[in-house]
Every structure is written in C-alpha cells, then in structure tokens.
Amino acid sequence: MRYLNNKYIFLAFVFLVLTVVTSSFSRNKSTCFIGMCYNAISENNSVITNGPKKMTDKVEKTDEQWRKELTPEQYRITRKGGTERAFTGQYWNHKENGKYVCIGCGNELFKSETKFDSGCGWPSFYQPTDSNNIDEREDRSLVRVRTEVVCNRCGAHLGHVFEDGPKPTGLRYCINSAALDFQSDDKEAQREETK
Ligand SMILES: [Zn+2]
C-alpha cells in the first residue's frame, strides 16, 4: 500500500513536471508573457539609470559633510535656504563671460549670456543652461508664495524665480552669489593657447 502511494506521488510529480515543460514550449503566450515581464523590469531599470534626470548623477552628502566642505555663508544659504544681503555677493555685478556652476556639486546652472542687470542686488538670469539641471518648488515661507530654485543634482538652495524678467522668457532667476562658482570662458581660452 505504501509502495503504491509512493508510486502515485511519483507519477503525480512526473505529470506536473511534464505539464510545466509542455506549457512553456507549446504556449508561446506564456513564454512571451515571461519575456515581457523581463523586458518591463529592464525597461524600468533603464529609466532609473538613463533618464534625463539621472539618479546616478545625484550628489548626496550628510549635513556634517556639507558643513565641512562649504564656507559658513555658503552652507547657510545652500543647505539652510538662506539669502545673502542684496548688493553684497560676489557676482551681482559680475560681467565676465563664462558659466556659473553650483557651489555644492559643480552642476552647470547659468551662462553669462543670460545674465542681466535687474537692479535687485543679486545675480539675475533669464534662463538656466538646462532646465533639467535645476528644480523649482513652491516656497510658502513668506506671505507671498514664491518659486524656489534648487540644484537638481545636490539639492542646494539657489534662490527664487520671478515672472518679471526680460525677453525672451520673461523670467528672472534671482540667485545667491554664495550658491554659485564662476568659470571664465576667457581663462579656458587662455589655457588652450598655452597648451
Ligand atoms: Zn548642486
């Protein structure tokens, strides 16, 4: 009797294995379905790694690291959402040709061609180098709602964007000098010449 039971269990097992094997060969849809699942997963992965706002590009540091790497003023502004006093920053009246990058991570933010004299005492630009390099968030810290501008790579607070800028965008990116580092085109040209 026990032998018979074992035999039946064995036969059931063989039947099960045969069913699984034949279904995966004969039912193409099933195989396809498995394939699609696989594709969907790899597609998702590619979105994470190859999308326009790359996850791998993000710079994440602890508060302690930022505090060590930045000056107290840069830390207060970029990591704590501070604002420098008008007409006191390094770049509000800066007119050299070049690009302005994030002080926290070197992400290119603005080009000097888009800088204009807004008279507000902070570096002002009518457009970022690449809209993917910045992120805009609603800021309700004052009575009037403003749009905060942050670095999309390291999350540094940069300043605010207002809708009273010049053509062609009509926007004014009002940015703290302390959140920026300037890289001169002229210096790059000079370096090229000395090579
Ligand atoms: Zn940054």
Image (cartoon, grey):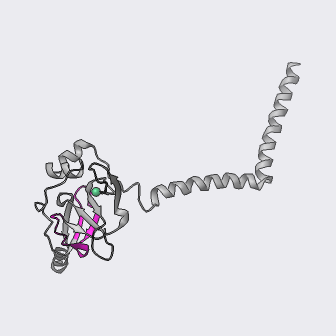
On the image, the x and y values in percent for residue 145 come to 31, 54
Tell which of 124 and 79 is nearer to you.
Answer: 124
> Measured from the top left, where is residue 101 in percent x and y?
24, 64
**Is 64 above or below relative to 165?**
above
Question: Looking at the image, can residue 186 be seen?
Answer: yes
Q: In the image, 173: left or right of 53?
A: left
Q: At x 51% / y 54%, what residue is drawn?
A: 45
On whether residue 163 falls in the magenta region, the answer is no
Picture residue at 15% right of the left edge, 64% below the top: 121
- State the image quarter where residue 90 is shown: bottom left
- Residues in magenta, as a range: 99-122
Q: Is residue 108 magenta?
A: yes
Ligand 1 sits in quadrant: bottom left
Residue extending farthest to the top is 1
Q: Nearer the viewer, residue 157 or 171?
A: 171
Regarding residue 107, the answer to whether it shows in the image is no
Q: Is residue 172 above or below residue 97?
A: above
Is residue 130 rendered to the left or right of residue 24? left
Q: Residue at x 24, y 55 (%)?
A: 104
Q: Quadrant of the C terminus?
A: bottom left
Residue 96, image quadrant? bottom left
